Image (spheres, rainbow, N blue to C red):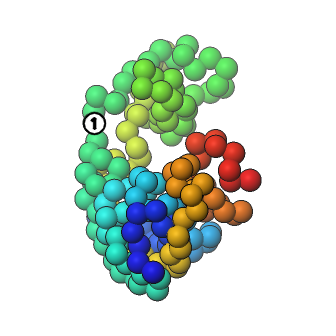
Amino acid sequence: MHIIKNRVVSIGYTLRDAENQFIETSSNFEPLVYLHGHENIIPGLEKALEGKTEGDAFTVTISAADAYGERDENLVIQVPLENFEGAGTVKAGMQFEADTPEGSQMVTVTQVEGSTVTVDANHPMAGMDLTFDITVVSVREASPEEISHGHPHHPHHAHGRHHHCDGCGGCG
């Protein structure tokens, strides 16, 4: 069965940056499971998987623009330390969920200097070209419920950093 829109796809992967440095792998977890054609994964990877079948293995490099986007320095801002009241000691590397006009967004603290905290709302991999070693583990038809919810339903979710849930309640 070929990977096309509205199919549930399970992949194994290893991810490296442009300097061939290891970033992460699914080998320590269950394969990544997603609903093809519903923007569950980065656009470049979804495009590279289109038409593949179970058992296919390949390597693909995805440009930053088709991965997590280019870095936007306008997303690096300084905020008063008092905005983090109740968060304990704020240090570089910490991540917080911030309320923005566009909704909730993850930000990473990059610097704390006096009463000013610099945060970066760019995705940590923004601006990076990414190379994936991919193995297509399985491909199946999605249920009407999965299609309407925009993501697969399965008893054991893929590695949490990649699974997006909109709280529809259908994943059990």
Badge 1 density bin: few <14, some 14–19, many ≥20, Cα 10 Å: few
Which corner quadrant holds the N terminus? bottom left
Q: Is residue 118 above or below residue 130?
A: above
Label 1: which residue? 72
Q: Position of residue 14 (x, y in %)?
A: 45, 72
Near-viewer residue (2 or 47)? 2
Q: Looking at the image, can residue 170 be seen?
A: yes
Identify the element where label 1 is drawn: loop
Amino acid type at image mark 1 = Asp
Residue 53 appears in which quarter of the rendering? bottom left
- Residue at image position (48%, 67%) is 7
Residue lying at the far front of the rendered structure: 144
Q: Position of residue 18 (x, y in %)?
A: 29, 64
Q: Is residue 81 above or below residue 22?
A: above
Q: Position of residue 143 (x, y in %)?
A: 58, 62
Near-viewer residue (152 or 42)? 152
